[in-house]
Amino acid sequence: MQKLKITIVGNGKIGQAIFHLLRSSKIYKSLKIEIYDKDPIKNRSEKSLIECAQGADFIFLCIPSWVEEEALLEMKAVLNKHTTLIALSKGINVSARKSMDELLEKDAKDSKYALLSGPMFAFEIIENKMSYAVLASKDKKVYKKISELFSKTNLRLEYEHDVHSVAIAAVLKNVYTTIFGMIESYGEKKNTRGYLASVAIKEMHGIMKILKLNEKIVDGTAGMADFIATSESEHSQNRKLGKEIFEKGIATFKSEGLVSISSLLKMLGKNSNKFPLLSLIEKILVGKKNAKKEIGKFLKNI
C-alpha cells in the first residue's frame, strides 16, 4: 500500500509539534513525512520546497502569516486537487492584506484546504499534554481525512464549516493578547486582567457582528479557549511582544497580533472607534504612544 505523503513547511516549534503528533498517530507507519524549512540548518529534508511539496497529499503550513504567500506562490506549480493544505498561522498576510483562508483561496485555488486553530502550545504538545483545536474546512470530508492523521493522539479536533469566521477570530485573539503582556508589566494583577478579558471578549463579539461573521466562534475553542491560553501564558509570542513594548518602547520581533492589527483596523474603518480596548491597542502598537501613560489613562476611565 502506497504511503500518504505529508509535508511540514516550517521546522519551528509548531512544525516540530505537528511532527510529534503525527509520530504518535495510530497510522504513523502509513505516512511518509518530509520536513522543510527555509533555514538550511533546520531543513531536515535537505530538499527544496517544491521537491517537498511535489506529490504531497497533505501540506501543513507551520509558518507565520507574513511569509505564507511567498511559500504558496513557490509551491503553486505542484499543487493540485489531490493536495490538502492545512494552515496553522493566525494572522492577516501583510502584503496581500488577506486572512489565511482568503490567501489560500487566492493562491491555492486548485487545492483543498483547512485551518487548524485553538490552544495548541507546541511545548505542551511535545511534552505529551492535551491540546485542542477547531479544524475549519468548507468540506467535512476534508476534516475527516485530516482527523485520521491524528488518530489516537493527544490532539482533540472539532469541525467548523465557517472557515472565514475561524480565521478572523484567531486574528482577534492575537491582537487582544498583546495588551495583556502590557497590563502585566504595568503591574496589574488577576482582578484587572480578568475584567479586561471580559471586555476583550465583548469587543470580539462586536467586531464579528460588524464584519457579519459568526459570533459563536468567539465563545469556542478557536476563540475564547485560545485567548485564555495565550493571554496568560509566558510562551505566547503576542504576550511577550506586549511586555517588550511596555518595558523597552519597541518590539525587536514580529508577532501575528502586531502584524495583523493595521489590516484589522482597515477592515473595520470608522467602526474601530466603537471598541475602547482595541483603540488602546491601536494607540500603542500603531500610534507608537507610550504604553505606560496610555494604559494609566485607560484604567482611570474604566
Image (cartoon, rainbow, N blue to C red):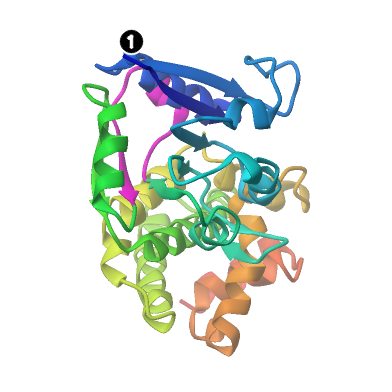
Q: Is residue 127 magenta?
A: yes
User: Looking at the image, which is closer to me, 6 or 136?
Assistant: 6
Q: Quadrant of residue 153?
A: top left
Q: Is residue 48 visible?
A: yes
Relative image position of residue 190 (x, y in whole percent):
39, 50
- Mark 1 element type: helix
Q: Residue at x 56, y 85 (%)?
A: 273
Relative image position of residue 223 (x, y in whole percent):
35, 56
Q: Residue at x 74, y 64 (%)?
A: 290
Measured along the vertical axis of the image, is residue 192 above or below residue 134?
A: below
Relative image position of residue 55 (x, y in whole percent):
52, 30
The residue where tag 1 is placed is 29
Quadrant of the frame with the N terminus:
top left
Q: Is residue 158 magenta?
A: no
Looking at the image, residue 44 sits to the left or right of residue 81; the answer is right
Q: Residue at x 24, y 51 (%)?
A: 140
Q: Residue at x 69, y 15 (%)?
A: 46
Looking at the image, residue 230 sits to the left or right of residue 108; the answer is left
Indicate the amino acid at tag 1: Lys
Q: Is residue 234 visible?
A: no
Q: Quadrant of residue 240?
A: top right
Magenta span: 118-136
User: Looking at the image, which is closer to me, 142 or 100?
Assistant: 142
